[in-house]
């Protein structure tokens, strides 16, 4: 059965399901403290994700791309798997495993691999603005998957925000997309699918269990991949490379996704996804502070336009 996205639910209508109650999770509503808590969790997730590209750049200083991708997932599986075992969490019901597989393919494997390969030839600032299209892609996936019907105002604001991101990206690349752009576009598509399924599943399971089981499901691939990558790619460990991979594993791959999925479950996939319009701008700041990249002159203008779009989408109702 399809569930309506709480981002477009009328105020005062609960978005919880019987599965939520059975999982012991608090009821989420479209108003009051629940929305405030959901927004906070989603914002924390965006803040964690904004460091993903700078951390990847750091990891690539001492490791190959395949090593970075596979190690981050294997390391993230350690706390996730330990928590599942320590709390004796039962495996999800059979009906949830298809969605968990989508999360594993999109969030654990697809996005990390494609974006890391792109960052071998792209700057983090350029990659950040291309991935800025992720909120619109996630909203589109949620419409197809959950039957959500956001309002016209919501879609107009989303399209304007996406247009700002596209214009910024084209201006920075000289109007000619390259191979790294194609990898990034593919990355945002698979990530949008993973986010949509994760947000939907987080209505039935705690967010940490969703990503935890996805990591466990992908472990045979990531463990074998890590072994092969370590034997084939040179490794020259530095403080940056170690710190980068550790953040990717614990911050981006596990803790960030835990709070992000829970935030989406409370306020809705479409609404939460629009908060990510701020992510490329945060990444630009980190690219300057952590990597010493030059901030594009158009960034402040793009920041203001994107933040205005976020304000509109957060107020939109179906």
Image (cartoon, rainbow, N blue to C red):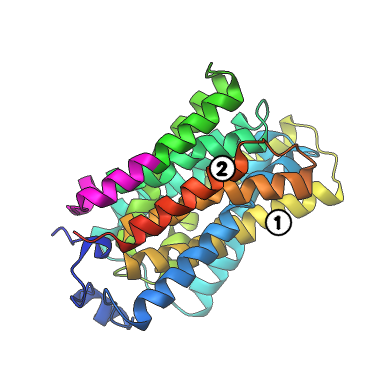
In the rendered view of the protein, which quadrant contains the C terminus? Answer: bottom left
Residue 161 numbered tag: none
Residue 298 lies, with reference to residue 192, above or below; the image says above
Q: In the figure, is residue 249 to the left or right of 146?
A: right
Categorize mark 1 by other alpha carbons within 10 Å: few (<14), some (14-19), many (20+): many
Residue 301 numbered tag: 2
Q: Position of residue 50 (x, y in %)?
A: 60, 52
Say which residue appears at 22% left-offset and 53% top-offset: 150
Is 24 magenta? The answer is no
Say which residue appears at 65% left-offset and 45% top-offset: 284
Q: Is residue 38 visible?
A: yes
Relative depth, front residue between 60 and 143: 143
Q: Which residues are magenta?
A: 141-160
Tell me how far mark 2 sits from mark 1, CA to CA: 33 Å
Say which residue appears at 60% left-offset and 30% top-offset: 118
Q: Is residue 141 visible?
A: no
Q: In the figure, is residue 78 to the left or right of 26?
A: right
Q: Position of residue 275 (x, y in %)?
A: 44, 56
Residue 5 lies, with reference to residue 24, above or below; the image says above
């Amino acid at each position: 059965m399809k569930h309506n996205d709480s981002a477009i639910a009328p105020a005062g209508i609960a978005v919880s399901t019987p599965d939520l109650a059975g999982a012991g999770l608090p009821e989420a509503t479209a108003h009051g403290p629940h929305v405030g808590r959901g927004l906070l969790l989603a914002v924390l997730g965006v803040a964690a994700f904004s460091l993903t590209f700078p951390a990847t750049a750091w990891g690539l200083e001492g490791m190959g791309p395949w090593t970075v991708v596979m190690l981050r997932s294997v390391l993230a599986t350690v706390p996730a798997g330990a928590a599942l075992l320590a709390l004796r969490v039962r495996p999800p019901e059979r009906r949830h495993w298809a969605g968990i597989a989508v999360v594993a393919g999109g969030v654990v494997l697809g996005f990390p691999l494609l974006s890391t390969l792109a960052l071998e030839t792209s700057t983090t600032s350029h990659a950040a603005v291309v991935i800025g299209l992720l909120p619109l892609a996630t909203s589109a996936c949620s419409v197809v998957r959950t039957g959500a019907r956001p309002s016209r105002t919501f879609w107009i604001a989303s399209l304007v925000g996406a247009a700002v991101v596209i214009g910024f990206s084209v201006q920075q690349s000289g109007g000619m997309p390259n191979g790294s752009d194609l990898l990034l576009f593919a990355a945002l598509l698979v990530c949008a699918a993973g986010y949509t399924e994760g947000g939907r599943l987080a209505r039935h399971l705690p967010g940490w269990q969703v990503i935890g089981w996805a990591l466990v499901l992908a472990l045979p691939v990531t463990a074998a991949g890590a072994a092969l990558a370590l034997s084939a790619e040179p490794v020259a460990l530095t403080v940056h490379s170690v710190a980068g991979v550790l953040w990717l594993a614990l911050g981006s791959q596990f803790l960030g996704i835990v709070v992000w999925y829970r935030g989406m479950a409370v306020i809705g996939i479409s609404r939460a996804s629009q908060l990510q319009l701020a992510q490329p701008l945060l990444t630009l700041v980190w690219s300057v502070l952590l990597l010493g990249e030059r901030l594009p002159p158009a960034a402040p203008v793009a920041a203001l336009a994107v933040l205005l779009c976020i304000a509109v989408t957060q107020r939109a109702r179906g």
